[in-house]
C-alpha cells in the first residue's frame, strides 16, 4: 500500500486524554471456532452490467456441492491484505438467499460476517446476494454506469474453518461489448480459475469500458488497464509502459526472477477521490491504483508503480511470519511492517534511479524529504509503528514506517556494503530471505531477518536492532553516511508560524485547522474563516509565503532544523566507495 498526497501545511493534532476510573475489566471468552460442513465444486458467478450498474451493485451467486445434510458456514473477509485495516465487507451484502435447486434453504447468521445455511440433503446448493459497490478505495469495490472494479475479498464467500486450498471457477456476466481485466488465469472468454482461496481474493477485476494495452518488461508481459477510457492519452500510455519497462528489471535483479507471466496495472482516476492523492494496493501479479484525476500524468506515479510492483516480491511472496498465511477474519499485527512497506519504498526509489526514471539528484531529494518527514514526526520505534498500523495512530506517525523504514533500508545497505567491502548489500539479504522463507512455503521471522543481515555483513546487527529498530534512538547519519562518501547537511531556518492550515476553494483561502496554542488562535482565527490578508500581506498573492516570512521572521520565530540535502563525496580521498556506486551498483 502506498498513499501519496500533495504537501499541505502541517496539521496540529490536539491531544485529549481520558482517564477511566479503575474497574474490573471483564473480557469475554474468545469466539467459538466455527466449522462449516465440507463443500466442493465451488463456482462464483458475478454479474455486473448496465442494469446492475443502475443499482450500483454486483449480483453474486456461489454454487457448490455437499456430500451430506448439515450446516454450511460461509464467511466474507474482514479486510483486504495490504490494506491493514478492518473493513467488514459483510456490511455491503443485501438480499442474501440460499436454495438447493428445488426449494429455498433456511439460513441465519452465525456471527457478524458468517452465514449459516441449513442444507437438508446432499447435492447442489446455490447462495446469492447483491453487493453494494460504492466505495472508491482500492481494498473495496466501486461501480459507475459503464464500469466497475471489485476485490475478491469483497464478493467471494469461503467455508469457515475449512482449508483455504480449494480451487474455484469465476464466471463474469456483463454487457457483450464490455471488457474484463484481472490477473486471474483465464480459461474461457468470461471464465477464470484460481487454485486456492488466497489466489482467488488476490486478483481484483476491472469490468466495463476501459483502455488496456501491453508491452514487454523484463521479458514478461506488462498490461496497463485504465479507467475512464480515453483519460490517459496515447502518448501518456506509452510513457507509463515505458516507465514500467524501466522499473521491472532492476527490481527483478534483486531477487533473480520475475515470478509472473503477465502483470496487470489496474488504474482508476476519478474526481471524487481526495484531490491530489493517489493510492496503490499490491497483489501477486497486479496492483490497483486509485487516483484523483488531477494526478494523471504526474511524474510521482512512477514511484507508486515502482512501490506496488516491488511488493509482488516483498510481502506478497517473502512475508513476515505473522502474515503467513493470511487470515481474513481478523487483524494480523506484525512488528515487521517496516520491512514490508519501508524497505519496499527504499527499493522503489532505487528502481527509479537504477532504471533511469529519475536521476541521482532526484534520488537524494526524495531521501532528504524522508529524513525531513521523520525528523518532524513524533519519535516512534519502527517495530512499534509497525504494530500500531492497524489502529491508525492520530499522533502523526500513522504512516511513519514507510519513510523511516525506507531510511533504515538505506542505512543497512550502506553498512552491509561497508562491512563486506561492497561484496554484499541489502540485495543479498532480500534474496536470502526470499529463498529461505517464501521459496520454502513459509513466512520469515524477526530473528531470521537479523540473521540474514548478519550473514551479509559478516557481523551482528543486534546493537543496530536494539537502538534503531526495536528502540527509538535517532538514526546515526553522522557516522554511517560518510561510509558511502556522503554527509547530511542541516540548515537552520527561522519561520514565522500562525499555527493555521489553509486550503484554497472557489471563495478564497479557507482555514481548515487552527493550532490552539498558535498566534493565529490568539488573534481569533477560527476554522471556516476565509483569510484575506495577514499583517498587511495579501494571502492571495502567489509570493505570500516569501513576503510574509521576510516581513515577520523576527517577530514570530519558529525555529526549524531540517535536512537540506546530501553533500556527496565528503571524503573521497580515502574512500573507494561513493554514493553513485551505491545507487547504481547491482550486486
Ligand atoms: Zn506498500
Image (cartoon, rainbow, N blue to C red):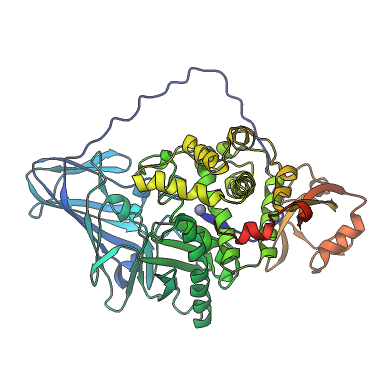
Q: Is residue 535 visible?
A: no
In the image, residue 22 above or below residue 351: above
Q: What is the x, y in percent for residue 328?
A: 35, 44
Q: What is the x, y in percent for residue 68?
A: 8, 42
Q: What is the x, y in percent for residue 389?
A: 52, 42
In the image, residue 339 above or below residue 128: above
Q: What is the x, y in percent for residue 293?
A: 54, 70
In the image, residue 269 above or below residue 14: below
Q: Is residue 134 visible?
A: yes
Residue 467 is drawn in which quadrant?
top right
Quick one: 232 or 344, which is closer to the camera? 344
In the image, residue 564 above or below residue 28: below
Q: Residue at x 61, y 51 (%)?
A: 422
Quick one: 370 or 190, which is closer to the camera? 370
As drawn, is 209 to the left or to the right of 393? Answer: left
Quick one: 137 or 361, which is closer to the camera? 361
As drawn, is 351 to the left or to the right of 443? Answer: right
Q: Residue at x 49, y 63 (%)?
A: 290
Quarter of the picture containing the C terminus is bottom right
Number of numbered discs on residues: 0
As drawn, is 455 to the left or to the right of 145? Answer: right
Quick one: 532 or 563, which is closer to the camera? 563
Q: Residue furthest bottom?
A: 234
Amino acid at each position: 500500500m502506498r498513499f501519496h498526497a500533495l504537501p499541505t501545511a502541517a496539521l496540529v493534532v490536539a491531544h485529549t486524554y481520558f482517564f477511566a476510573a479503575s474497574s474490573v475489566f471483564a473480557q469475554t471468552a474468545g469466539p467459538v471456532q466455527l466449522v462449516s460442513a465440507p463443500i466442493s465444486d465451488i463456482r462464483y458467478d458475478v454479474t455486473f452490467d448496465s442494469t446492475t450498474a443502475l443499482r450500483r451493485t454486483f449480483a453474486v451467486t456461489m454454487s457448490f456441492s455437499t456430500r451430506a445434510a448439515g450446516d454450511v458456514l460461509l464467511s466474507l473477509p474482514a479486510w483486504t491484505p495490504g490494506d491493514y485495516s478492518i473493513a467488514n465487507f459483510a456490511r455491503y451484502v443485501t438480499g442474501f438467499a440460499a436454495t438447493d435447486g428445488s426449494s429455498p434453504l433456511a439460513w441465519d447468521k452465525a456471527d457478524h460476517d458468517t452465514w449459516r445455511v441449513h442444507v437438508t440433503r446432499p447435492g447442489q446448493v446455490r447462495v446469492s446476494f447483491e453487493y453494494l459497490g460504492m466505495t472508491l478505495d482500492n481494498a473495496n469495490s466501486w461501480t459507475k454506469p459503464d464500469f466497475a472494479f471489485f476485490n475478491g475479498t469483497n464478493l467471494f464467500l469461503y467455508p469457515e474453518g475449512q482449508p483455504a486450498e480449494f480451487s474455484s471457477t469465476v464466471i463474469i456476466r456483463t454487457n457483450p461489448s464490455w471488457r474484463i481485466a484481472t490477473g486471474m488465469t483465464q480459461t474461457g472468454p468470461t471464465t477464470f480459475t484460481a487454485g486456492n482461496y488466497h489466489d482467488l481474493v488476490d486478483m481484483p477485476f476491472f469490468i466495463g469500458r476501459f483502455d488496456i494495452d501491453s508491452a514487454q518488461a523484463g521479458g514478461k508481459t506488462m498490461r496497463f488497464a485504465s479507467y475512464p477510457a480515453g483519460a490517459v492519452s496515447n502518448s501518456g500510455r506509452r510513457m507509463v509502459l515505458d516507465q514500467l519497462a524501466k522499473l521491472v528489471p532492476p527490481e527483478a535483479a534483486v531477487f533473480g526472477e520475475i515470478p509472473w507471466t503477465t502483470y496487470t496495472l489496474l488504474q482508476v482516476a476519478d474526481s471524487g477521490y481526495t484531490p491530489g492523492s493517489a493510492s496503490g494496493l499490491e497483489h501477486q501479479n497486479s496492483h490497483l491504483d486509485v487516483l484523483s484525476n488531477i494526478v494523471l500524468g504526474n511524474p510521482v506515479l512512477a514511484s507508486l508503480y515502482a512501490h506496488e510492483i516491488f511488493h509482488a516480491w516483498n510481502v506478497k511472496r517473502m512475508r513476515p511470519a505473522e502474515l503467513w498465511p493470511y487470515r481474513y477474519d481478523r487483524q494480523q499485527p506484525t512488528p515487521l511492517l517496516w520491512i514490508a512497506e519501508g524497505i519496499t519504498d527504499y527499493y522503489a526509489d532505487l528502481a527509479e534511479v537504477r532504471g533511469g526514471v529519475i536521476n541521482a539528484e532526484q534520488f537524494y531529494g526524495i531521501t532528504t524529504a524522508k529524513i525531513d518527514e521523520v525528523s518532524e514526526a513524533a519519535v516512534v520505534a519502527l517495530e512499534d509503528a509497525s504494530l500500531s498500523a492497524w489502529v491508525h495512530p492520530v499522533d502523526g506517525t500513522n504512516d511513519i514506517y514507510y519513510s523511516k523504514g525506507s531510511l533504515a533500508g538505506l542505512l543497512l545497505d550502506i553498512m552491509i556494503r561497508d562491512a563486506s567491502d561492497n561484496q554484499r548489500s541489502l540485495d543479498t539479504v532480500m534474496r536470502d530471505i526470499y529463498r529461505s522463507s517464501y521459496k520454502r512455503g513459509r513466512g520469515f521471522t524477526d530473528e531470521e531477518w537479523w540473521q540474514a543481515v548478519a550473514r551479509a555483513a559478516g557481523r551482528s546487527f543486534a546493537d543496530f536492532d536494539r537502538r534503531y529498530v526495536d528502540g527509538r534512538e535517532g538514526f546515526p547519519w553522522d557516522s554511517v553516511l560518510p561510509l558511502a562518501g556522503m554527509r547530511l547537511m542541516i540548515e537552520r531556518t527561522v519561520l514565522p508560524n500562525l499555527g493555521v492550515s489553509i486550503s484554497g476553494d472557489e471563495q478564497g483561502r479557507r482555514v481548515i485547522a487552527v493550532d490552539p496554542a498558535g498566534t493565529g488562535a490568539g488573534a481569533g482565527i477560527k476554522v471556516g474563516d476565509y483569510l484575506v490578508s495577514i499583517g498587511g500581506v495579501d494571502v492571495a498573492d502567489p509570493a505570500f509565503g516569501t513576503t510574509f516570512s521576510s516581513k515577520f521572521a523576527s517577530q514570530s520565530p519558529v525555529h526549524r532544523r531540517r535536512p537540506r540535502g546530501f553533500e556527496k563525496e565528503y571524503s573521497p580521498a580515502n574512500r573507494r566507495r561513493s554514493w553513485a556506486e551505491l545507487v547504481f551498483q547491482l550486486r
